Image: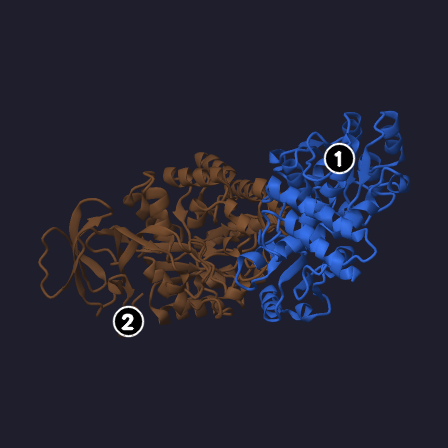
Amino acid sequence: MAGNTGTYLIRGASILGGEPADLLIRDGVIAETGTGLSAGDATVIDAAGLVALPGMVDVHTHLREPGREDAETVETGTRAAALGGYTAVHAMANSTPVADTAGVVEQVYTLGRTAGWVDVRPVGAVTVGLAGEQLAELGAMADSRARVRMFSDDGICVHDPVLMRRALEYVKAFDGVVAQHAQEPRLTAGAQMNEGEVSAVLGLTGWPAVAEESIIARDVLLAQHVGSRLHVCHVSTAGSVDIIRWAKERGIDVTAEVTPHHLLLTDDLVRSYDPVFKVNPPLRTDADVQALRAGLADGTIDVVGTDHAPHPSEHKECEWAQAAMGMTGLETALSVVQHTMIETGLMGWADFARVTSTTPARIGRLGDQGRPLEAGEPANVILVDPAARWTVDPYRMATMGRNSPFKGRELPGKVVATFFKGHPTVLDGELNTPYPYAAAPAGAA
Amino acid sequence: MKHLLSTQDLSRSNTISILDTAEEMAAVGDREVKKLPALRGRTVVNLFFEDSTRTRISFEAAAKRLSADVINFAAKGSSVSKGESLKDTAQTLSAMGADAVVIRHWASGAPHRLAATDWIDAAVINAGDGTHEHPTQALLDAFTMRRHWARLSGTGSEGADLKGMRVAIAGDVLHSRVARSNVWLLRTLGAEVTLVAPPTLLPIGVEKWPCKVSYNLDDTLAQGVDAVMMLRVQGERMNASFFPSTREYSRRWGFDDNRLRALDRLGMKDTIIMHPGPMNRGLEISAAAADSPRSTVLAQVRNGVSVRMAALYLLLSGDTREPAQPVLATAGTAQTKESN
């Protein structure tokens, strides 16, 4: 339990979009809830009109450090996360060196604590160097100070079925999960965009839906066979939603994630040849977008993961085929999900909390994240102004990446405050100060 | 029209303007002195990221006949091969005062990037981008077909379109920028297009294109065609399992001697055989077909210069709404000047 994080009385926030109530935050926890709580020595935050939600948990973030500090650092990426309403992020393993040893995951974990903006939970690589040939020391990463529970070769598919089977089996020893980047490599050699009507016209090599769906189908069957837990990263096609729905109906322990960009954008945008729209898996069709929204609403898809992927500008200011794949997402995720899921009537704010906080924390086995907004719980809380509207300007973001596909769009919803372990990392929509780990008692998590 | 990037966004009237202007340019090519002063003092850069001697010299001849200064920038052996980006190359050319950039690039969409960004303010002409488009090739093909179609109907080419003409385009449609540009342009001009290819060499989504699709060249010929365009097929596609062998490809989808005879047998005496070059004789087209009186291969090359002159002229002289008048005037002036 941390101390010295101050006392805050959040006055009149709509709890998960429901009835207004007060939240008293003290010493890192929600000390009291109710109405008309007395302020005492607390700093009072008038939250009338604001929605209180559990701090968001991203299951899929690329922080780029170590190795590509020209693209993002743990410091800049986690500032972006805090501004976006996150109190925890899972840092993907495709850094340089790859996070495939206890040493690297501990380095990333330590960088996260030094930054102090959110919980940084390193994801361990499944295979050494993401090479898909030999299992990395998953147990050592699990036992390290970083306590890794999620393993992924994200960016590359664990396509060897035997290796995937072994990974799924092995992580059972420490309650781990394999997060699969589902992409059949032979079907996607040189792929540039979704294969369909638009790729036919543009003359860009297609990335067919079947390359994702065939891997997901194989993996859910493997997970069933060995009795393991599988997580599917960035589901992008209607067919994948169907397969995951089928697997869940059979009781297979699979969870799935969708990115904000796949909930909103389609491959029609590629007609501009602007590489800001180049991402892997690629933007799909409107039918896919609608199926993903329906899947998220009905629980087939469990969580929203940003796949935040910052790139230096020179990797996007070039020919489409030369450009890097990926989009930033931490500072727009809440707004895009509000726009696509809440304003469409598909979900309420309680559902939002489930798909952005509660379930992601459960998948990553983060005990103190994604908790109910109740007395005694860790004070990872955000306040959102759902009535705000803003125009996306990548040059005003905290991330170093300027590659936001939402540039110039007007979106709803703004994070007003983020409390991380009871400390306000964001206040009045601006970065405040990081969590004072040094001031906290020794052993504070 | 500031750029020429694709035939998909060319209107019918713009297309016919370009073709009519090309007729004017062709007339210049028939003269003893094949030069107009229209683009004197303007700089045209041929920016080639992919080898294509034929297209490059065609553009070079076109620009020179219009008196433009021509700079050839081949990416191989240049700063580009040392890692210079398209952006830096474009800004360099801009700083040197290029008025038009003729770009050939292996990456689909590269000309669109040049046109859409603020890297360079020149007119951009797509001289073939990846497997996307090759608009001047389609324009020269349409020019060639229009002359043929007009001659058959006993009328002049000027102002005419290709209404009712039946065109078969056969070969590797999947990887062909020529096929794409032709499908859009020929549709705009009113021709009826049938694509003929093995199913592996047709893109997913082709069923939405404004044309018919066939897997059988003999059936397509039997139903009647006025022009058959054979696309180059690369033997190495065989290694990627697009077809089992070059011989099987040639038997089923090549324009061989049997199919040449079939045109005679079916009474299609006026059907022309086209090829954008370079040809693989014996693979997609037999030597007899390539050299037959039906072949328009060399006329296509000749017409390419006229069409590219028209494109350069229209883009660099600005107004595309009434292109015929200034060309006529310029041509007249030129003739006077050159004869002095």
Q: Is residue A312 above or below residue A174?
A: below
> What residue sits 33% from the left and 61% below the top?
A83
Is residue B338 in sight in this rendering?
Answer: yes
The amino acid sitting under disc 1 is Ala
Q: Is residue B61 left or right of residue A299?
A: right
The image quadrant that residue A195 belongs to is top right
Residue named by callout 1:
B150
Residue A436 image label: 2
Q: Position of residue B79 (x, y in %)?
A: 67, 71
Chain holding disc 1: B
> Chain B appears what colour?
blue
Subunit ID for the residue under disc 2 = A
Discs 2 and 1 lie in a common subunit: no
- The answer to which of B253 and A408 lies nearer the viewer is A408
Could you classify mark 1 by the number of other residues whose Cα lies within 10 Å: few (under 14), some (14-19), or many (20 or more)?
some
Display colour for chain A: brown
Please name which of the two marks, 2 or 1, marks the residue nearer to the observer: 1
Screen quadrant of the C terminus of chain B: bottom right
Label 1 sits on a secondary structure element that is: helix
Q: CA distance from mark 2 to mark 1?
A: 83 Å
Give the x, y percent position of residue A74.
42, 67
